[in-house]
Amino acid sequence: MDVSPGNPLSLTTGPGVRAAAIYTRGAVEYERTSPRADAELTIEAAALVCDTDPERAALTLYEAAHAARHGAAHDLLRRAADLMRGFTPPDDWPPVVAALLGWAELFAGRPELAVGPMRDLYTATRGGANHLTHRITAGFGGLMIADDDEVIAEAEDMLAEVRAGGALGWIPYTLNVLAVARLFRGEFADARACVAEGASVSDELGNTTESLAHRSVEVWLHAVAGDEARCRALAEEVLPRARARHRVNAEIAVWGLGMLDLSARRFGEAFERLERVSQGPASRDLLIRAVPDLVEAAVRGGMPDRAEGPLAAFCHWAEHVDRPVATGLALRCRALLAGDGDADALYTEALRLHERHGGPYERARTQLVYGEWLRRRRRRTEARAHLAAAVTVFERLGAGLWAERARGELAAFGERGDEPRRGGPLTRLTPQELQVVRLAATGHTNKEIAAQLFLSPRTVGHHLYKAYPKLGVTGRAELTDLVEPAAGEPGK
């Protein structure tokens, strides 16, 4: 720290006052420079008060760990973890400190030491009677260990709470968690609504880092929709700044670009991008979920041996997070690499898990690669059934290039695939129309919806007026039948 006479902190000798001042500087640097700069300062601040003020030390180390994680600065997370191991946290902080230490273990490649305390925090915070700091830590941690369903439920509760309490500053962070969880579950329309609101609120608050985080996720969502022009244009705009500001979500954008290439059968380009992600600084964070795309790109691109290292790390993670969606993805990857004697059983078991867990998108992805495998072995009837099912799901989700690839497989064995269809009715809505419709379908009045979304009741009414013809309904009584099947689809 600068203690030169020109620095006001040089006039302050009390460690608590100095720690508070440095903490404030860190918050400023998070926005002005980068999360890494924030983490460096808050680690310095925490070191001043670990022995004398455990409450302040716990909050400061929480900030340091989150900032280091956003910036994929794992060297700083290790330094924060060293301080956490050396002090006794106050009464309500031990589960949070243990979970943050779990983050450090996870990023060091030791999920066997990470999952227990991370999941314990999630259990401890369930029900809402906890600090928002504790709950957001549980939310981000849950995403890292494939607790997608639980994260969605708790993040929705947290979002309702911060809206009701007017805690605007928490909305972008909560929506970030919810957007990624919905992305993982294949709930793309809802993820887009989260991203649109998260970016808008961030911009209103002057929170550039969170705005870039949301727009990085938007790149991925444009990719899965097959909107190549918008995906690449947004990536070109966002990535140069996002890499310095929010490295984890910037890597989600790069994953999206690789996945776009994969859906368009540009396997070499897809592998190059996805390999960079799998070797990058966030590879053991959320980006572990990009490995199945890398494996598929490697196999289809004729270089399966280059997938073995990333797949070994993924399977190690999947074994210890012990969630059906992760196990199903690992089985799909192993099937892609397996010989004819083993692949069929692996695909079948992966599909069995994805029928009930992980959402429709991962189920359709598994049906696509299994259908491709069956077609090449002249098992025409089975192949057509899986490929046709994949086309239906991809079209309903608005995943255009994936649907086109599945139709191409159907055409390759002499059958004409169905003509392309538009996605399901909810995909026709704007993000804010979707938010309004979902709330209206659950019985909220226009006034209640307006209060939750910080809109006027008149604006809510306008959104419903615009949404009804897109959905083919005439009033809110008909919304429940449209919304509930999408939210509660089998496999979710």
Image (tube, rainbow, N blue to C red):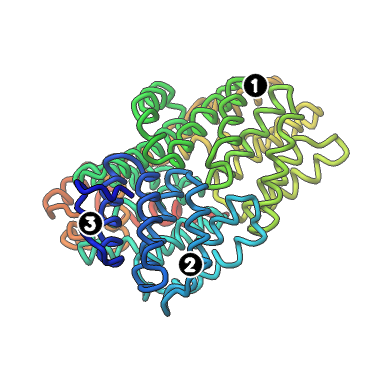
Identify the disc placed on residue 411.
Answer: 1
Question: Residue 478, position in %: x, y?
Answer: 32, 55
Q: Amino acid at mark 1?
A: Ala
Q: Is residue 200 above or below residue 490?
A: above
Can residue 471 be seen at all in this image of the molecule? Answer: no
Mark 3 residue crowding within 10 angstroms, few (<14) / some (14–19) / many (20+): some
Residue assigned mark 3: 168
Query: Which residue is drawn at the image coordinates 72% and 28% (left, top)?
Result: 299
Count the labels in the image: 3
Nearer to me, 70 or 424? 70
Question: Residue 13, position in %: x, y?
Answer: 26, 63
Nearer the camera: disc 3 or disc 2: 2
Q: Residue furthest front?
A: 5
Question: Residue 484, position in %: x, y?
Answer: 41, 57
What element does badge 1 sit on? Answer: helix
Quarter assignment of residue 339:
top right
Cα distance between the residues tagged 1 and 3: 51 Å
**Badge 1 or badge 3: first in the primary sequence:** 3
Q: Is residue 29 above or below residue 421?
A: below
Query: Which residue is drawn at the image coordinates 63% and 20% (left, top)?
Result: 268
Q: Amino acid at mark 3?
A: Leu
Nearer to me, 465 or 179? 179
What element does badge 2 sit on? Answer: helix
Identify the disc placed on residue 97.
Answer: 2
Nearer the camera: disc 1 or disc 2: 2
Look at the numbered discs 3 and 2 and tell me whether their residues touch, using CB distance below 8 Å: no
Quadrant of image for the C terminus? bottom right
Cα distance between the residues tagged 1 and 2: 55 Å
**Badge 1 or badge 2: first in the primary sequence:** 2
Quarter assignment of residue 384:
top right
Question: Residue 273, position in %: x, y?
Answer: 56, 27
Can residue 231 be seen at all in this image of the molecule? Answer: yes
